[in-house]
Amino acid sequence: MNIYVCSTSAPLPVGENDLEVAKKFLESFGHTVTYSGNMFARTGNTAGTIEQRIEDLHEGFANDKYDLVLAATGGFNSNEILPYIDYDLISKSKKTFCGHSDNTTLCLNLYQKSKIRSVYGLCYEYLRFSKSKDELIDYNDALISAPNYKANLVSQLSTGKVLRGGEMKGTLIGGNLSVINWLLGTKYGMELTDDSILFIEDDEDSHGSYWQMYLRKLEMLGYFNTIKGLIIGKTPFTEFNEGADMRSILDTVLKDYKFPVIYDAYFGHLRDNTMLNIELGINIALNV
């Protein structure tokens, strides 16, 4: 598979030499890696101008030599390129996009507007922290949509703690909780259907109070009225006020709903950088 890496969000924190581990990891699975022309650009808070980021993104989908477009890193401000994306061009490409964190913006909108395969998974830069090829086989399986990917995904999601049991049956959609909230009220917000299973995670900068505030906003907008289940990733580095934790927050916000809830599932901003990759729109069934 030919993988095209481009910067959509914040500037890369490292240079090309520092990315050799990431490149060799992907090449160890037989993939080729190509960097976009403006991948190392820097314009203030972003990886180049809007025009540079759009040019690179479109090249990845328009050029037939590439099979998958991988976000270089996360950060902030990928939302500002959303109005300039040619969603029809990307739709015609039928390629896969992969990224996480701030790239929730692209994962959601390329899935919803362009109808392409979109994977919420580690950005390229994070692969330089990987310890061994064996530890990230699941990552590769998600990229190539391996036959065993769905079964492994269900198995790993099932390892979380159960707040409320039951059957979750539907299609997965979600991403980073903060980014999802930043998009609310715009035409680029997350769209749920009557069979959606929502998955969310966040980084250590999101205090427990933010979790409660953001979840409550989703509730006020009616997002919890139709979902078939909620799956929350691990939050090992998130700080909570005394007497509060994730379970108590969920008990407070979700007490009037009956859908099954799993938390502390094995995905999210984990410092071991073996985050589970989750394909948006994939249909699963979980009994918890």
Image: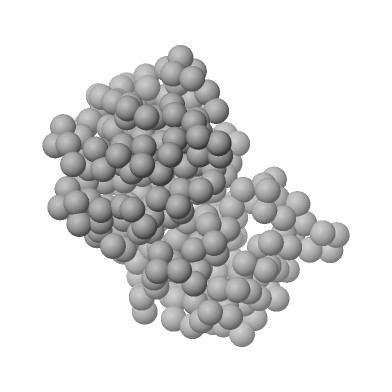
> In this rendering, would 167 be left or right of 241?
left
Residue 41, above or below 58: above
Dividing the picture into quadrants, the one containing residue 191 is bottom left
Horizontal side, residue 155 vs residue 148: left or right: right
Q: Is residue 184 left or right of residue 38?
A: right
Q: Position of residue 32 (x, y in %)?
A: 25, 24
**From what the image shows, is residue 191 above or below residue 88?**
below
Residue sitting at x 25%, y 53%: 86
The x, y position of residue 42, in whole percent, is 49, 31
Q: What percent of the width, then of the height, locates residue 176?
A: 52, 55
Residue 41 visible in the picture: yes
- Above-or-below relation of 79 to 30: below
**What is the count of numbered marks?**
0
Residue 280 location (% of width, % of height): 35, 57
State the residue at coordinates (45%, 61%).
174
How does the figure colour the protein chain or chains?
one colour
